[in-house]
Image (spheres, rainbow, N blue to C red):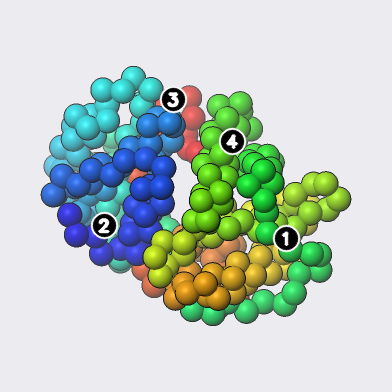
Amino acid sequence: MIVRSLALTTELGLATTRGRITDRGDYIVVETPDDPGYYYGNLLVIPAPPQVGEVAYWMRRFGDELGKNPAIRHVTLWWDGISGHVGAAQELDAAGFTIDSSVVMTASEVVAPPAPAPIVALSPEQVLATAELDFAVGDRHDETYREFLHRRARWHRTLVERGTARFWGIFDGEALVASLGLVTLGNLARYQDVQTAVAYRKRGYASALLATAARDAFSRGVEQVVLIATAGGEGERVYARVGFRGIERTVSACRYPPPFSGG
């Protein structure tokens, strides 16, 4: 399957560092064997927004490819495209899906004032601390989600050990209060987990981290940095102020397992 979307191109690049990618010709199967409950690590990439009458078909394909694993209780579909078309929204809603629309932003230069606190490159072991920061600023506070974040942090640690990624952070004493990662994928690099503790927001930490990571990546031959932001969210506005511009819209849908409605 030929993929047009930069969002999906970089997402599949990330997936190859951890899981399995199988191209069926008319769709792509993404699997993350070490984390079957990872909603966006076990999914189908489909060529276009599902139209009326197609949602049930893609749900069956998901079941055939991934549903035999009893630990996979969700259904995630992410469709190729750059314009943000949703397709059969009512049919997706009736089937229990939550639709996610995001903006894909890129920059060839990121400019921000220096941070009011030192920025450091995180060691592989320090990368593990990003999980607890993510947990503190997230919407979910259950142990299942915490364990998911720690698995994700261990994957990020592996990427840093391989030299595939670099993570950056700001500390207040021993506490990590802001961080992000940047994973190199050829001449592109994709941001991961841009996050700042609530009490430290609006101090320019995120902007400075974005610029530091970008400068480092450009110095190593990366031509373009990429991130995905919630359309219309505060993050999109922060990123635009330091040089990012939206170039496409991407849409996915997940039918989450009970009792959670997202995450």
Vertical comparison of 148 with 86: above or below: above
* Mark 3 Cα-neighbour bin, 10 Å: few <14, some 14–19, many ≥20: few
Q: Amino acid at mark 4?
A: His
Q: Amino acid at mark 1?
A: Val
Q: Say which element carries label 4.
A: helix
How far apart are labels 3 and 2 at the CA level? 27 Å
Vertical comparison of 14 with 227: above or below: above
Question: Would you say the residues marked 4 and 2 are in contact, meaning their CB atoms lie under 8 Å apart?
Answer: no
How far apart are labels 3 and 4 at the CA level? 22 Å
The residue lying furthest to the top in this view is 70
Residue of label 1 = 120
Residue of label 3 = 258
> Quick check: 14 left or right of 183?
left
How far apart are labels 4 and 2 at the CA level? 29 Å
> Quick check: 58 left or right of 138?
left
Residue 3: horizontal and vertical position, in percent?
24, 60
Q: Say which element carries label 3.
A: loop
Residue of label 2 = 80
Question: Would you say the residues marked 4 and 1 are in contact, meaning their CB atoms lie under 8 Å apart?
Answer: no
